[in-house]
Each structure stands twice: as structure tokens, then as C-alpha cells.
Image: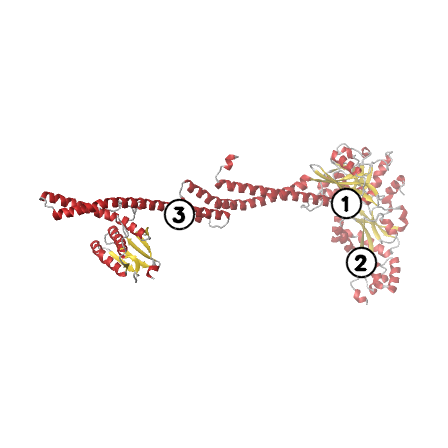
Amino acid sequence: MMEEYTPMLFTRDHAVDALAAGLLPRRSLLLAGLALAAQPVWASTHLLPIRIGIPHKTLALDYFLIDELRMYFESRLQHPVEAVVHGRFNNSTAELYRSKLDFAWVTDYPDAQFQDQVRLVAVPLYRGRPYSSAYVIVSAHDVHTRSLLQLRGAVFAFADRLPNGSYLDVRYQLLTAGENPDRFFGKVFFTKSHKDVIKSVALGLAHAGAVDSVIWDAMVKQQPHLTTMTRVLAKTVEYGAPAFIANRRVSQADFDNLQRLLLAMDKDAQGKDLLKRMHIDGFIAGDESIYERQFLMRRALGDQ
Amino acid sequence: MKRFFDLSLRYKIPIWGSFIIIVTTLMVSLSLVYKAYDDLRESLLVSSASLAHRLSEDLFHPMIEDDLWKAFEIINAPLVSSDAKDRQKPKIILILDNELKVVASTNPMLIPMGTEVNQLTPEYSMFVQRIAESKSMTHPTYDMQDEQNFYIAAPIVHDGFTLGTLIVVHSKDEILWPKFFRILIHGATMGLIALAVLLPINWYWAHCTARPLVLIGQRMKENDLDAATEVVDELYPYHDELGELFQAYKRMLMEQKNKEALEKQVVHSERLAAVGHLAAGVAHEINNPLGGMLTAIDTLNAYGNMDPRTAKTVALIQRGLKQIKETVGALLVEARVRNRDLEPLDFEDVRSLVFPQIQKKELQLQWASNLARAVPLQANQVRQVLINLLLNAIQAANARGVVECAVEDQQTQLLMWVENDGQGFTPEQRSHLFEPFSPLSQSGQGHGLGLWVTYQIVQQLGGKIDLSQENGRVRFSVTLPLDNTKEA
């Protein structure tokens, strides 16, 4: 009976091998065991792949790139990998906690609420440093605005409302300038994508917006007609780059495998090509001190 | 205007026809174009309304979640449609909240967020007012149009809860007019093609109808009736009313011609009869004293002893009187007492009698007779008629020419005709043909009474004499009725 389903990801034998090799997460293993007894075919298709949450719009990765990344992981890990494109998820860390994902590349780390449940796997390097920064941009027609504080009452666009980088930083700057960050702008909206922040400012829907500097720089080359319609007003202070994190329940072996893979990505040609397309120099193991400043800002804004 | 109606049919018919064709084509084209315009406008409104309805449904959730970007993306999507042929692309789409302030528009530079509706062009305020006035907000969409634009509105509503209004604006310049102009050009092209086909047909038809009318009119003006009849058959061989009119006209012409000929003949006959009466009267009055005079001279010659001089004078008088008697005798053609019936042999006699003359002129005589019985006609008179005609023919024939004579027994009548190849008669000559002392006697021989006598004899026998000239031949035909009852 099983042989009829060979196109499936795992046959019973494969699953047993995988268990023996310690490749599967603990919970998956448990469920897999149950499923093997009860309904092996169903079990093999649903539980065994490694599920990695990969941001789509917030990191401006296209679907081809995400799929190639997934296949790269799959071939290097010798294990099926399922890419869960988030973007429609509000909070990747929360998803991680609910064990729907094994790993995730998130823009909201560290989320204090779930910090016990996750482990940092790797941090990307932008221009050689594990930090990102954001530009505050205004329309190119707006030649009068010189600083963030002149944008009182303006319509402001952020990529997302997750308590990370630009959203955090802009509000923190307002707070330190003695303004109420929640009342300063006339209207705030979220585009869920850095590209759309540029677009909304270029079209005039928003007076100003905050956009990841790496993505804006890349857009200068890719879609200059959009970026030329905007002007960089200010650059934020550096903050920790979006982290690659693991569910704490993931086995050490899986954790090590993926971490080793990420750290060595810049060593092989295919990995190098993918990194280049993501505008990343490489990954380092990193530590929580990179995100120190985010902690401070969040605490000051009372977000946590 | 009168000047137009005075124009020749040659121009009037095609001008009228062309005028009617052009007016008809114009009206048909215009009505089709108008219908197309109406359909176009209707379909634009329907598709716009469905777009507005769909967008407003999609907008409710982003708006209630205050997802401005999502809302903007929804309204912007129809405008950035990559299909270049999508000519129904709206000009602008905007979302109004319940306070009538702009939430988002597809052109935020022009209409930024927070703009109040009365800050926009007045059409928007009018439109919003009109929607508010139509109490039942149950309509899925509303529409309005001014000179430049169509405005379509749809409430953003869910379960009766209204968040605002979506307004879709279509520019007529961008959508309606280009399509309409294409329809217009298409219509105009079809109209021109129709005209290009119909106008030449009209011209040809008008030409066919007008030409015979015009030609007949001309001929009538020139009083050339023969030519007018020819025109009818050549130019209009059809049997419609016009054709029948032409045929009737032709018949009328023929009848008139016949009537004229008949009248001429009657006048001619009457003149001949009057002349005949006069001549006969005069001849009688002369004949009686003449007979006495001749008798007296005979008596004188028999008994009187005259000196030679007197005798010479009396002989002179006697010859003169005889000549008068001969002439008067010729004028006095009287039905003499019937002597005997006509027999085939009589014609042989006539032939023999004229033969020396034929030979003298080296003519060719063609003789044909199918008479094989005695017929009840006075032989002397028929012989005289035939001799007269033959002598005339011999005299008129060309040297070494042909004279032809035929006799046909047709049971109820006897037909004789004599033909020669000599010169024909002029119309002037023909009109005085059978009169006595006519100037026809070209050679100057005879007394010019031959044809007159012939005519009188034929009249007395109740027959007819006709002249016809065809193919260079001159033919006298005589028909004499046969009173067969007597024979029976």
C-alpha cells in the first residue's frame, strides 16, 4: 500500500530513518509516531518537512527568490523544507511559539513576550555589519521639510506595525524630542512592504514614510522612476538586522544544521548568489547584544 | 424655386433622386450612430457601475480596519491595469467618508487625503447632494454626467452599515469620444460606400427614364413625328407605365399619320371626282353641237359643189372637229354597254399589242398570269387599263430595263400590277397623279389623259388603283372586285 504513495515526501522507512538520525523536531516526532501507527500516509505529508517562515514583503524578497532559498536549504539539509511565506502573519514570533514553524526569519526580534520560546540562529550582515537602518523619506516635491519634527500632522507610511526597526526608531526619536509619538502624525498607515512605502510617498498618498535603507538603495537601481520621486530626509540610528530564529523545541541537531548552513552560505557559489540577491553579505551567529538598543527603545515607548 | 422646377428632366430627376438618397443615407446613418452612442454610453455606465459596486464591496474591510494602503491599492488597481487596450480605465477614483472628506484618491497629489467635497469641483458637491436627496440609499450605484465626465457612486456598506462613498469618474474625452468617433467614422464610411453605389445607379436610372422623354419632347418641338416614334422603341423597350405611355403616344402618332394620309386621299379623290364631273359636263355640252357640226360637214361634202378653196377650208374644219371629238371622247369615259367577259386570252392580246414597243426600247418584259377562267369583268375596259399602264411603264423604264406585269385571280377580286425600274415620282408629282392633262407625260407624247382615263375606268369598275415605290421600282397595282354571283 505504501509503495503507491512513493511520490509523497516520506515513506514509513524514510520517516524511521529520519527519526533515527534525529533530524525531526521533538513534537513532530511524537506526532509522527502517532501518525505512523494510525494513518501513516497522512502523517508523512503533514508533519515531517522543516517549516521555515520567510518574510516576503518586509524584506522585499520575491517569490522566485524564496523558492530558490527553500530548495537551497532542502538540498543542503538533505531534508524536505517548507517555506511559509509570512506577510499575511502579523507576528512571526507568535507563530513560532505556536509551533507552527520550526524556524523563522523575523523582523520583530526580540519580542519579549516570546523570548523564552525562541533561540537566535543567525543575524544577516548588511554592509558587513549585523545592523540595519531606515531612511525617512518625503516626496521630491516637498522641498521645505528639513527634519522629522517638521512633519507634525502629516500622513506617515510605515512598512509594518511590528515593534522593530524603523517604526520603533521614528517613534523613539519623537519621544526623545518631547513629542507624543502616537499623536504626532495626522495619520499613520502600514503598507506591509518597503516598496509600497516608497510608492505611497512617491504618489503623494503619504507625506512621508520610513523605509529600510538597504531596500531603498536597491530600489534606486531597480526602479529609479519611483525613488527619484522621493527624497531622503533623515537616516535613523542603526538597529539589529532581522534575525533568523528557531523554535526552542527544535532539536539541537536541526538547530546546528541550519546554523552551520547559514553561516557557510557565503562560502559556496549558489549561496553567494542568493545572498547577493537578498542584498546580504552573509550571516553571523550573532548574540542578543545586537538587539540591546531595540529593548531600550521598546521599554521607553512602553510597547512591551 | 421655380427656376429649379423649370429645369430639364435630364437634371431634375437625378437631382431629386440624389437628394432623396443623400437625405435617406444621412438619416439612417445618423440614427444608427445615435443608437450606437446610446448603447456605448449605456454599456459604459453599466460596466462602471459594476466596477464601482465591486470596489465598494472590497473596500469595506480595509476601511473598517483603517488599512489605508490596502484601500488605496484596491482603488488604484483599475487605473494601473496593464492592458493598454483597456479603454474603460477610469480617470480618477476617490473614497469619501461619511463626513464627505476624501479618505483616499487615485491621484493623491491632486486630491489629498482630508479634502472636503466642497473643495473639489462643484460637480462632486452636486452629485453628493443628489445622492443624499434620493432618500432610499438602497441603490447599489448612482450616476451623473456633465460635459466632460461620468460620475458613478457606490456606498461602501456592509449589513446596512455605511462607511462612506466610492466615486468613480470616467472622462468622456478618454473613453466615450474616441469610441464614438470611431463609430462615427465607421458610419460615415458605410454611408459614403452606400452613396458611391446608389448615386451612379440613380444617375443611370434617371438617364434611362429622362432621355426618351427629353428626345420625344425635342422631336415634337421640331414636329418630326417619324423620328419621335423611332425614339420610343429604341430607348424604352419596357412595359411599365412609362413604357405604356410611350406606346400609347406612338399609337396616337401612327393614327394621326394614318388619318392625315386618309384625309389627303379623300381630298385627292374628291378633287378627282369634281374634276371628272366638270370634264364630263363640259364634254357632254361640247359633244352635242359637235355631232351636229360633223353631220353638217358630211352633208356638205356629199351634196355641195365647193370650189377647191372652200373644200380645203371645210376639210381643215372637219379635221379640227374630229380632233376635238377625240379629245372629248377621251374625257368622256363612260361605262359602255357590257360587251363580253374577260378571258385569259385578252391578256395575251395585250401582251402582243405592247410587244413592239418593248422591242423598240430593248426592254425585258416579265409576264405572269394565273388567270385560267373567264371572269365577270368588261374585257374592253380591263384591256384598256392594262394597256395604259404598260405603255406608261415602257415609257418610264430605263433603256434596256425591266417591265414586269402580273395578273392574279384571287377568287373575289382580280389583282393586276405593272412594275418598271424607271425613275420614281416626287411627292409633288404624286399629289397630282391621276389628274387630267397632268404634266407627267415626260416625253410630250399623248394628251396626258392616260392615267386619268385609267383611274376613271377603275372607279367605274368599283376597284382601286395604288402607286407604290420600293427598291427602285415603281409599281401600279389595280384591284378589281369580281361579281361572282352573276356567273353563278
In the picture, the disc for residue B53 is: 1
Task: Report the chain holding disc 3.
Answer: B
Residue at 10% x, 44% y is: B306
- x then y, percent, for residue B164: 81, 40
Can residue B284 be seen in the rendering of this structure? yes
What chain is tagged by disc 1? B
Nearest to the observer: residue B481 or residue B100: B481
Q: Quadrant of residue B79?
A: top right
Q: Which residue is mark 2?
A: A80
Closest to the observer: A243 or B86?
A: B86
The Cα–Cα distance between marks 3 and 2, rounded to whole angstroms, is: 121 Å
Give the alpha-carbon distance from disc 3 to disc 1, as whole Å: 91 Å
Q: Which residue lies under the disc numbered 3?
A: B258
Left/right placement of residue B407 relative to residue B170 reads: left
* Same chain assignment for discs 1 and 2: no
Q: Secondary structure at mark 3?
A: helix
**Mark in front: 3 vs 2:** 3
Question: Residue at the top extreme?
Answer: A144
Task: Give a yes or no on whether discs 3 and 2 share a subunit.
Answer: no
Mark 1 and mark 2: Cα distance apart in space:
45 Å
Which residue is more in the foreground, A49 or B83? B83
Q: Secondary structure at mark 2?
A: loop
Contact check, label 1 and label 2, Cβ < 8 Å:
no
Chain of the residue that carries numbered disc 2 in the rendered image:
A
Identity of the amino acid at label 3? Asn
Between circles 1 and 2, the one closer to the viewer is: 1
- Estimate the x, y position of residue B226 in percent, counting from the top left: 40, 46
Local crowd size for mark 1, using a 10 Å CA cut-off: few (<14), some (14–19), many (≥20): many
Kindly identify the amino acid type of the residue bearing the numbered disc 2.
Pro
